Amino acid sequence: MPSEDVIGQRYLSGDYAARNPTWDAEDAPWKAAQAARLIAHHGLVPASIVEVGCGSGGVLAELRRIYPQARLCGYDIAPGAARFWDAHAAARIEFRLGDFFELSRERFDLMLVMDVIEHVPDTFDFLTRLRAHAAHHLFHVPLDLSALTVLREAPLLAQRERVGHIHYYTKELALALLTETGYRIVDWRYTGAAFASPHRTWKTRLADIPRRIAYALDKDIGVRLLGGETLMVLACPAS
C-alpha cells in the first residue's frame, strides 16, 4: 500500500486537480441543501461552521445564504482547491490553506466533513482528533461498497484512480467507524444520490430502474446490493 506521504502528494502536487478540474463544485448546491435539511430538522442554528476538506468552498458559499450571520471557515490542504476561493469573496468565508490540526485550536458549533474520510489514510486518528473541535459534526460519505461494485471491481478501482478513494463504505461500516472513534450518532439519512445528485453518469442513469425496484422492496438491502447512495450523518462527541 502507498505510504501516507505518497497519498498526500496527490492533493499537494496538482495530480488530483488535473484529474478533477472542477473539484466537483457543481455538486455543492445539492450537498449544501442536503446538509441544511438535516441541520434544520434538529433545530440547530450554528453561529460558527467550519468545513475540513472544503475543496472549492462551494458548500460553505451555499450555506451563507441560509446562515447569513454565522461565521464560516474552510480548510483544505490542496493548493488546487484554493484557486476557487476568490470567487466566494462576497460570502465572507475565512479560507485557510493547510492542515486543520496545525492551523486551528478552535471549537466550532458545527463541523462539516464532506466526502473526506474516504481519502484519509488513518481515518481513526483523523476522526478522533476532529472530535474535540465541534459540538456537532456533519459527515457526508459516499457508499462505494456494494455487492455489485465488489463483483465488478472496476468501479472501485476507478474511484481509487480518479478521485482518490482509498477506503470504501457501506452505511453500517460508516456508522460503526464513527461510533468506534468516539461519536454519538444523532441522525443519519440516505441522500437520494442515485436519482438526484448532479454528478450522475449514463451508467448511473441506466441503473435507475433496477435500483428503484430494489429500493422500494427494502432500501438498506437495495443499497447494499446495487449501491448508488451516499450517507449524511449528524453526530456529536460521545463524551
Image (cartoon, rainbow, N blue to C red):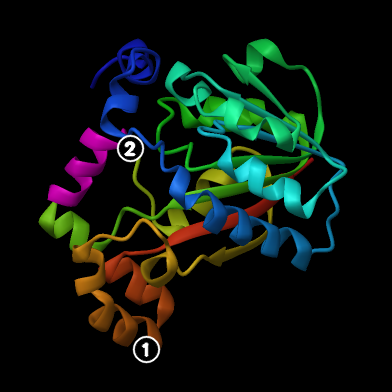
- What kind of element bears circle 2? loop
Would you place residue 139 above or below residue 21 in this image? below
User: Residue 102 location in percent, x, y?
Assistant: 65, 10
- In the image, 138 versus 46, the foreground residue is 46
Q: Quadrant of residue 12?
A: top left
Mark with earlier residue (2, 1)? 2
The secondary structure that most of the magenta stretch takes on is: helix
User: Residue 81 location in percent, x, y?
Assistant: 48, 26
The answer to whether residue 184 is visible is: no
Q: Amino acid at mark 2?
A: His
- In the image, 125 versus 214, the foreground residue is 214
Q: Tell me the residue at 32%/34% (across/down).
A: 20
Q: Quadrant of residue 86?
A: top right
CA distance for labels 2 and 1: 30 Å
User: Residue 87 location in percent, x, y?
Assistant: 58, 32
Labelled disc at residue 217: 1
Q: Amino acid at mark 1?
A: Leu
Q: Which residues are magenta?
A: 154-164
Q: Tell me the residue at 34%/12% (across/down).
A: 13
Labelled disc at residue 165: 2
